[in-house]
Amino acid sequence: MNLETVPLTHYLFLSATLFVIGVVGVLVKRNAIVVFMSIEIMLNAVNISLIAFDRYLNLHDGQIFSFMVMCVAAAEVSVGLAIIISLFRNKPTTNLDDFNIMKS
Amino acid sequence: MELLIFYPLAGICILFALGVVINNSPINSAISLIAMMLCLAGVFILQQAHFIAILQIIIYAGAIMVLFMFVIMLLNLKGKGEDDKWQSRDRNVLLNILSGLLAAGILYKLISIINEAKFNSPALTYENFGTVREVGTILFTEFVLPFEVASILLLVAMIGAVVLAKSKVD
């Protein structure tokens, strides 16, 4: 289509960078909701590479797959936020360091 | 043209993603996540994934982030106190440095893998590649079973969320 197209590797670099930012968020942040947001960043980063390869290979499978990723993300967020709400009801904080009820 | 749009979008995207991690208050993190998702929708349009770009705006920036905002405001989380700081009282600086090093290692490895891979010059996409019609045709013929299974997954998640939020944890 265009003569000057962005090479596939640059889309993959963007994807890798966003994924690593998400990993840092999960490792460093202690607020459960922000950890969930970082997981969303990671899912989005995977979607970028799926769609970049989808265009590169001239297939539509990558788009279908990222659609499925979005479905799973929506399901994960609804269940995860419900878990956070019911944890908050038990102990009024969202700091992950305060939750060690699984430790016997 | 694509170059002119892609690099600013990618830069803004990374800045807002960093904003999610750096901000201390969860509501600021949520707003910068919304901005990041809108930029990503632009990136998807550049790659002729129009359907996914629209879904990105409707589902992520619309539904999921509204849910996040709703929960943040429901729980009345403020950006004060030690709960939301970069390092809270129980974690020392060493752990944060270690996780930063781990992340830098992952990034370095990913970038070196991408650099080593040899991609051919991209094949020219055909006329109406990535239109909603094309994607919809494939979604409802070849991938109709995964599509229906996804709807069951969403139903299960909905029931699960209602049950979890209703009952008390003992």
Image (tube, coloured by chain):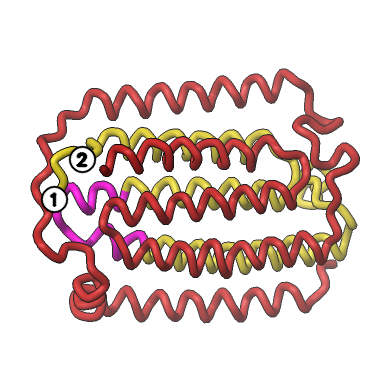
Q: Nearer the viewer, residue A38 or A100?
A: A38
Tell me which residue sits at (39%, 40%) in the image. A15
Q: Is residue A16 left or right of residue A93?
A: left
Q: Nearer the viewer, residue B155 or B51?
A: B51
Q: Are marks 1 and 2 in contact (CB under 8 Å)?
A: yes
Query: Which residue is the site of mark 1?
Result: A1
Q: Main secondary structure of the magenta part?
A: helix
- The picture quadrant where one finds residue A4 is top left
Q: Is residue B137 within the magenta segment?
A: no
Query: Which residue is the site of mark 2?
Result: A5
- The picture quadrant where one finds residue A16 is top left
Q: Amino acid at mark 2?
A: Thr
Q: Is residue B133 left or right of residue B10?
A: left
Which label was assigned to residue B69? none
Q: Is residue A78 left or right of residue A50?
A: right
Boundaries of the magenta span: A50-66
> CA separation, marks 1 and 2?
8 Å
Mark 2 Cα shell of 10 Å, populated few (<14), some (14-19), many (≥20): some
At mark 2, the secondary structure is loop
Residue B23 spot, x, y in % from top left: 71, 39
Indicate whether A91 appears above or below A11. below
Q: Nearer the viewer, residue A3 or A20?
A: A3
